[in-house]
Image (tube, grey):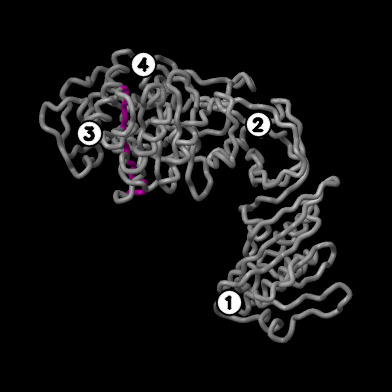
Amino acid sequence: MNGAAKGAIIGGVFLAMVGGAGYGVYALVGEAGGDGGEDGVSALSAGSGPVEEKEAVAAAKAFLAAWAAGDERGAADLTNNPAAAQTAIGEYRTKAYVSRAVITPGPPSGTTVPFKVEAEITYEGTTKPFAYDSRLTVVRGLTTGKPLVDWQPAVIHPQLQKDEKLRAGAPASPPVKAVDRNGAELTAEKYPSLRQVLDELRQSYGSKAGGRAGAEVWIEPAAKDTPGRSLLTLVEGEPSTLKTYLDATVQAAAEQAVAKFPEASVVAVQPSTGHILAVANNRKDGFNAAMRGNRAPGSTMKIVTAAMLMDRGLVAADKPAECPKTVTWGREFHNLKNFDLPPGTSFATSFARSCNTAFIKQIKPVDDDSALPKEATEVFGIGLDWKTGIKSTDGKVPAATGASAAAAYIGQGRITMNPLNVASITATARTGVFRQPLLVSPELDGRTVATAQRRMKSSVQQQLVSMMRLTAASGTAREAMAPVRGADKGAKTGSAEVGGAEDSPDSWFTGFSGDVAAAAMVEGGGHGGEAAGPIVAAVLNAG
């Protein structure tokens, strides 16, 4: 410690008080007194109305002093959830193995008090520093009226969420050294979007791949089937090498692309193999929406709908398909800004312009409410319980009637997808064969890979690819796909109104270039080409 701080070592834990924070000096070893004076006592008394900054400072001071002194019960009683606080503070020593901690409060901001923890963790003879910043907020007790620390797990450590715990020791799964398809190492430091993916790979394959566990500090999640998040290595283990199908170059491009848009996710797959080349997310909640999301995919679903209609001989790329401003099926549906297309316009042009009414008008000729779900499952493999190597969510195309069926034709209603699902749909359209997306080889654990019931008809596949090429060349995807190198490229845009939000729909975009297919989604990002489009274009160029 420097000369600006004074403190007390009590029970092996050290509390530093910085004069600039407005806190007094705690009792040194051997002294009997404290610094709680009349102002401090009154600030902890019952009151009413909003908590004042003076009260927040006094409550925070008392709580941090008790925590630092190892007084679990005393600290817990200064919170609005004593039971949870006492358990967490006790386990800070007994299960996180904190042997020493210097807690330095910072200047308060209203009822929030930041503080810095400089701790040491000692496990089986090894001691490592463990430093971090956190904060607490003081609220009025509902029954006592006293100022109390609003107990949240993040008080103990800022990365702790509800029902999560701080732990140290020997982890259940040995470490793995994940590498891409070419042998380049993949780390969370270099590729932040892969942190959760790498944690899941370690949980699933660490013990199978032959590594040896060391000792770590980690966050234990609330759900037992969710991997822990490593915070600090205490003793190096012996990692095994785990080969993935990811491509470091494509992954880097995906990371950079999603970073430009909040709440963005993207997946790239190789159509000829189904191998997943990149997974990236830029989200506040850290959720792997790229592989586990479930939101309406908008007009990207028209790839499946078009395949079903052509499969049944109801439309053809070069045949006319009426595109009026509106159409009624259970309720009225319209095109973006109520556009229409001249009589005699081809179905390919209606697809490229993303004409909703051209698709919905085909419901009556189809005359089969199960037609779209069958096409999605039997040809595109949607809903076949994909086992990619980590957790992923299958797309859902439930049977529907009336207005719900019409909405399904254009990717709305009860249909849900994520970028992984939509990238796979594009990959299937590209080759005519569904190949289940894979992150790692199924030979690692003998898992079963999903297979589709039937191959797409060759004529349907050729028309789908030609229509996606037209969409990229002169349709709604033209601007976004213009930077993509090479002549062999196709795309489909989509926007999905979630909760009736016409002014801020989810932005969807999917496309292919050569042997790479990609799909992206940006929640509330607008129309497909505006946000998701540039993400997909950047990923395709990297492939």
Give percent across and percent down for residue 81: 67, 64
Q: Which residues are magenta?
A: 488-500
| Label whose residue precedes the other's in the sequence (4 or 3) | 3
Q: Amino acid at mark 2?
A: Lys
Label 4 environment density (alpha carbons within 10 Å; few <14, some 14–19, many ≥20): many
Looking at the rendered structure, the number of numbered marks drawn on it comes to: 4
Q: Quadrant of the N terminus?
A: bottom right
Q: Residue furthest left?
A: 343
The residue at which mark 4 appears reads as 456
Q: Is residue 494 magenta?
A: yes
Q: Is residue 142 visible?
A: no
Label 2 environment density (alpha carbons within 10 Å; few <14, some 14–19, many ≥20): some
Question: Could you tell me how far apart the alpha carbons at marks 3 and 2 are, in whole angstroms?
Answer: 46 Å
| Label whose residue precedes the other's in the sequence (1 or 4) | 1
Residue 353, numbered circle: 3
Q: Amino acid at mark 4?
A: Met
Residue 51, numbered circle: 1
Question: Could you tell me how far apart the alpha carbons at marks 2 and 1 are, in whole angstroms?
Answer: 50 Å
Label 1–label 4 contact, CB within 8 A? no
Q: Amino acid at mark 1?
A: Val
Residue 521: image quadrant is top left
Tag 2, which secondary structure?
strand
Give percent across and percent down for residue 327: 19, 37
The answer to whether residue 79 is above or below residue 430 is below
Q: Nearer the viewer, mark 4 or mark 2?
A: 2
Tag 4, which secondary structure?
loop
The residue at which mark 2 appears reads as 177
Question: Could you tell me how far apart the alpha carbons at marks 1 and 4 are, in whole angstroms?
Answer: 66 Å
Give percent across and percent down for residue 300: 34, 33
